[in-house]
Amino acid sequence: MTSTGPPPPRDRRPRPAALRSLPRALHPGAWWLWALGLATAASRTTNPLVLVLVVAVAAQVVAARRSQAPWARSFTVFLKLGLVVVAIRVTAQVVFGASAPGNVIVTLPEVPLPAWFAGVSLGGPITQEALAAAVVDGLRLATVLACIGAANALANPKRLLAGLPAALYEVGVAVVVALSFAPSLATSVGRIRAARRLRGRPDRGLRSIVGVAMPVLEDALERSLALAAAMDSRGYGRRAAVPLATRRLTAGLTLGGLGGICLGVYGLLDGTSSAALGLSALLGGVLAAAAGLRLGGQRTVRSRYRPDPWRGPEWLTAGTGALVAAATIVAGVLDPAGLAPTLVPLAAVPLPWLPSVGILVALLPAWLTPLPPDAAASAARGASAERGLARTPAAAGEVAV
C-alpha cells in the first residue's frame, strides 16, 4: 500500500539567472562611462535637436534608475546650472558680442572702443543669427553639465572609490571628495531651505540667496571633509615595499598613459580634430596606463568588502554610452552638416538619423538594468498602498449594505 501524503516542498530559492534581475546598485563606473558617452556626443555637435535629445535621454534614465540617496537629487541642480550658463552666454552676446550679419531685432546704444578691442563691441545691433548662435553654444555646455549631473545622480561616489585600481587609491580619495561635493551641496540646499521655512524666513528668490549661500557651502564642505577623515581613519593610503626600478617604471607608464588618454579624449571631444588620431592616442594611453596601474597596485595593501560586481547590466550600460559616442563620431565624418548646421541664414534644423538612433539606444539602461534596492522597496510599498486603497471602497460598500 502506497502512501498518499503531501508532496515534498519545492525548492523556491532563486536561480543564478534570477539573481541578476534582483534589485541591486549598478556599478558606478558603468554609469560614468554611459554619461561620458553622452557628453562626447553633446560636445561634437551644435545641432539643438540632438542636444535636447541627449538631455531628454539623460533625464529619463535618471528618473527611472535613481535611488533615494541624497546625491540622487543633484541632477536637478545641474539642470538649473545649465540654464544659468545659457542665460550668461546670451547676455554676453548681447552686451559684448561682435555684430553679425542677419535680421536685426533691436539696436542698443553702442559705446566706441579702442582699436585693440578688435572683434568686441559694447552694444550695437542684435541679430537673430547672433542670438541663435549664443543659445546653441550655451545649450551645448548645459547638455554636457546635464550628462555629468546624471552620472552624479546615478553613481554612488563612495562605491566609485572602492572600484578604483589600487594604484589610484590615494588620488581616488581626493577625486571622491570632489565628486561628493556637488551631491552634498544639493542635500544641504534642501535641508537649509526647510529650516528657513520653519523659522518663517524666505527660502526662494533673490532675498534668500544671501542667507542660504554661506550655510550651504559650509555644510557641503564639512560633509566632504568628514568623508575624507573617515576614509583616512580606515587606513587609506597604506603602502607595501616595492623596488625603486618598479616604482619608476610604474610612474613612467602611468604618466605616459594618462597623457595619451588626455590627448585622445581631447581629440574625440574636439570636432575639428581627427577622430582616428584621437582614438589611437586614447587606446595607446589606456594600454600604457593599465600596465602602470597593474604594477602600481603591488605597493598598495588593502582589502575589499563586498565589491560591486560587473555583470551583464554593467556591460550593457557602458556599451550604450560607447555606442552613442561612436555613432556621433561616424556621423561627423559621413554627414558633418547634420551635426553642425549653419545658422546664417536661419532655417529649419535637420535631425540626423545616425546619432539620434545611437542616443535613443542609451535609453536601454532605463529598462534593462536592475532597480536600486531602496527604489524597489519604495515601489513595492506604493503598490501595496494602492492595493489597499482599491480594496477599501468595496469593503465599505459591503458594510453599508
Image: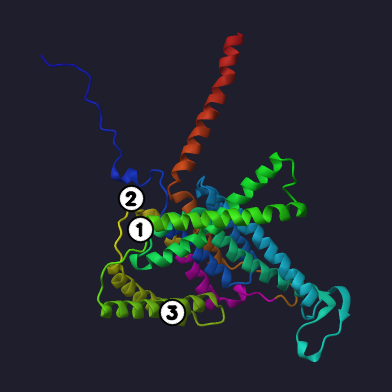
* Residue matched to label 1: 235
What is the three-letter code of the residue carrying label 2?
Answer: Arg
What is the three-letter code of the residue carrying label 1?
Answer: Gly
For mark 2, give the secondary structure.
Answer: loop
Q: Which residues are magenta?
A: 322-342
For mark 3, give the secondary structure.
Answer: helix
- Residue 297 belongs to the span the image colors magenta: no
Work out whether 351 lies above or below 314. Answer: below
Residue closest to the eye, 23 or 128: 23
Q: Sort mark 1 into few (<14), some (14-19) or many (20+) by Cα contacts within 10 Å.
A: few
Question: Disc 1 to disc 2, how far (Cα)?
Answer: 17 Å
Q: Which of the two discs, 2 and 3, labels the residue nearer the N terminus? A: 3
* Residue matched to label 3: 259
* Residue matched to label 2: 306
Question: Disc 3 to disc 1, how far (Cα)?
Answer: 29 Å
Q: Which of the two discs, 3 and 1, labels the residue nearer the N terminus? A: 1
Residue closest to the eye, 379 or 1: 379
Residue located at (25% from left, 32% from top): 11
Question: Disc 2 to disc 3, how far (Cα)?
Answer: 32 Å
Horizontal and vertical percent position of residue 257: 39, 78
Q: Sort mark 2 into few (<14), some (14-19) or many (20+) by Cα contacts within 10 Å.
A: few
* Label 3 with label 1: CB-CB less than 8 Å: no
Residue located at (32% from left, 77% from top): 250
- Residue 335 belongs to the span the image colors magenta: yes
What is the three-letter code of the residue carrying label 3?
Answer: Gly
Residue 133, image quadrant: bottom right
